[in-house]
Structure formats: C-alpha cells, structure tokens
Image: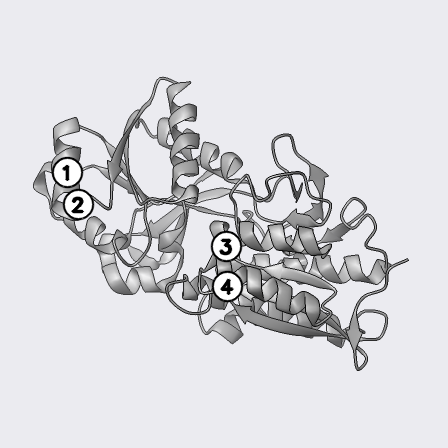
Amino acid sequence: MNTPASSGGTVRIGALAPLTRPGWAEAGRHLLTGLELAVQHVNESGGIGGRHIELLVRDTAADPRRAEAAVDELADLGVAALAGEYHSVVARCAAARADARGLPYLCSSAVLDALTEEPSHWVARLCPAQSHGWRIYADFLLAEGHSRIAVVAQHSVYWASGTRILRDHLAARGGTLVELDATALSPRAVCDELAARQTTALLLLVGTPDPAVPIVSAVRRDERLVGVLIGAPAGQPEFPEWAQELGRDGTAIPFLRYLPDRLTPLGTRVEEALRGRLAQAPSFVAFEGYDTIVVLAELLRTGDTSAPWADIAVEGTRGSIRFSRVPGIGVWQWAWPPVQVVDRDPAAPDRFRVRHTG
C-alpha cells in the first residue's frame, strides 16, 4: 500500500503551467487559478485524510526541457502526484518523465493524442484527445457548407497532428484541405493564396498574438475574401487578450471549448468563485484545472497508487468523471468531456455563442 507523500503534515502536488512567454501565459493563469481554487476547497473540507494539500507550482514557459527538469525536481521533493500543463508538446515530455519516475500525472489541458509513446500506467488526461475534438470541429465546418478549407500552420507536432486529423476527416466526406506555411508566407501572401484557391474557410493553426492577429487583420480587410470564415480550433479567441488585440475583427471565429451547455451544481459554484479570482469570466481551462485537483484528491484519498485511475469516479464541474482505455491513446482518458464549437458574438464581443455541440 502506497501512501501520499507528505511534508510537515501536508500532501504535496506538483503543478505545471505556462506562466510566462513564450508560453500561452493567459491560459496558464486560468489553469493555475482553477488548480489553486480546488486546493483551497479540498483543504477547507478536511484535505486528504486530515492533511492539507500543498501545491508546488513550476512555470514551464512552453519549454519541453524545462518541464522535464521540473518533473524531476518535483519528484525529488516528494510530491504525491503531478497536475496541469496546457501545451501539448510540453505535456508530452512531462508525461514521459512522470511515467519513468512512477509518478501519477493528470494532464489538464493538452490534447495531443500521442501524449505518451507507449501505454502508461501512471498518466491520465482530462481534456479530450485532439482526434475527438477536431473531428467534431470538421463536422461543424461541413454542416456550415464549407468543403474547400485552408489551414495556415506553423511547424510543430501539434499543428501537424491537427492538420492530419482535419485532412483525413474532411477527405472521407468529400472535403479538401489546402495547407499554407505560416513561416514562409506573409499575411498578405496568405490572402493571395486564399483568393487564388477560392477557399471558403481559413483555419489558424498558429500561435497568438503573432502570427494569428496579423493574419486575421489582413483577411478581414481584404475585399476579395468577404465571406471567408476564419476558424481557430485550438481556442485562440477564448481569452480576453484576443478581443483586446482584434476588437470586432476577432469575433465570429469559431473555436473548440470543453464546456457543457449547463454546468453541474458544483460547476455553478466554482464559476462564481473563479470569476471573483480572475476578475473576468473563467475559461474552460480554469474548469479543467479545478477538476484536476478534484480527481487527484480522490486518487490520493485511496492511499493506493498501484492502480491509480481505473476506479476513480467523481463529480466534476462539467460532469461525472471516469477514466478508461481508449483505442489508439496510451494514457487513461476521460472519454469524453463535453465539446462545443463557439465564437465571440459580433454584437457583443465579450459574449460567446454556441455554434455546434458534439
């Protein structure tokens, strides 16, 4: 029987999040806020067998090597489990180190299907796999009448995986995907390609604010491209920074969000508390952070990490959470969190419209 690691009567959990550039720091802040709020709530309700959770936070800054070093450091400090991370390429490195160290790791927000190279006993994931969510996004595009679609993408494992998922899913349903290289084309050149190829939708598989913001601005101002849908399946428009950078140009750009049509009673209470801490509406990433600690608290209460994920069953902010083995995915997976396609309302950019659910 393994017992949770502790120090001075506390149970330590390591937390990974991108809190500084070049990481998506706004997402990291929401993730960390959710983690911290859940720790407060668990501690107020008695902790883990009477011991409080202590969260040891490490900034990954979207750097895989930095994440690997953080996992080793936290393991050496005796954490009982690891939580968090937003960027897929970073979480993949963290997962590999956690697996090698025999340390339970619940990934909050990284969707890359191949989170581990081989099936892992120690790693689980809350967010949906990229293949699940991005196929739902492709179905939304087809339902909206878009069958000739372009992606403008940067070079990374994550963007390449997303491109492949979209291309294969669209091709099987009569759609086509045109690939544009964001590193080789200026925003103006992207517009020229869209006009020449007569695509009706452009998907941003790029970082924000650069080059996403300049590309959106260029497309919105090009008279040849009136009516072209801009999409961002990875969720760039979710956070207030997007609206601040682009204003009305940043509206009507559909993205994936992992929230239900209606939160659970717990989720409703958590939403109010998160809003108070963030001084803005919480993103789905904040709820992922909260649910991560809810799951890990239940895991650590059992005191047994020999079979860490199979018997977990908890009520989270977005539904009942259980883990299973999904074909083609090497980690224990919540299959599936709720998935929505939403955008910012042109009539009120701070308000989101649900365009599709899956």
* Location of residue 151 in the rendering, given as x and y in whole percent from the top left corner: 29, 37
Under circle 3, the secondary element is helix
Q: Which residue is mark 2?
A: 219
* Location of residue 3 in the rendering, given as x and y in whole percent from the top left corner: 85, 64
Circle 1: is it few (<14), some (14-19), or many (20+) Cα within 10 Å? some
Q: Earlier in the sequence, mark 4 or mark 1?
A: 4
Q: Are marks 1 and 2 in contact (CB under 8 Å)?
A: yes
Given the image, on which type of amino acid does mark 3 rest?
Val
Task: Give the left or right position of residue 293, taking residue 221 as reference.
Answer: right
Under circle 2, the secondary element is helix
Q: Which residue is mark 1?
A: 225
Given the image, on which type of amino acid does mark 1 rest?
Leu
Q: Which residue is mark 3?
A: 90
Is residue 223 or residue 23 the one in the foreground?
23
Q: Quadrant of the N terminus?
A: bottom right
Given the image, on which type of amino acid does mark 2 rest?
Val
Circle 4: is it few (<14), some (14-19), or many (20+) Cα within 10 Å? some
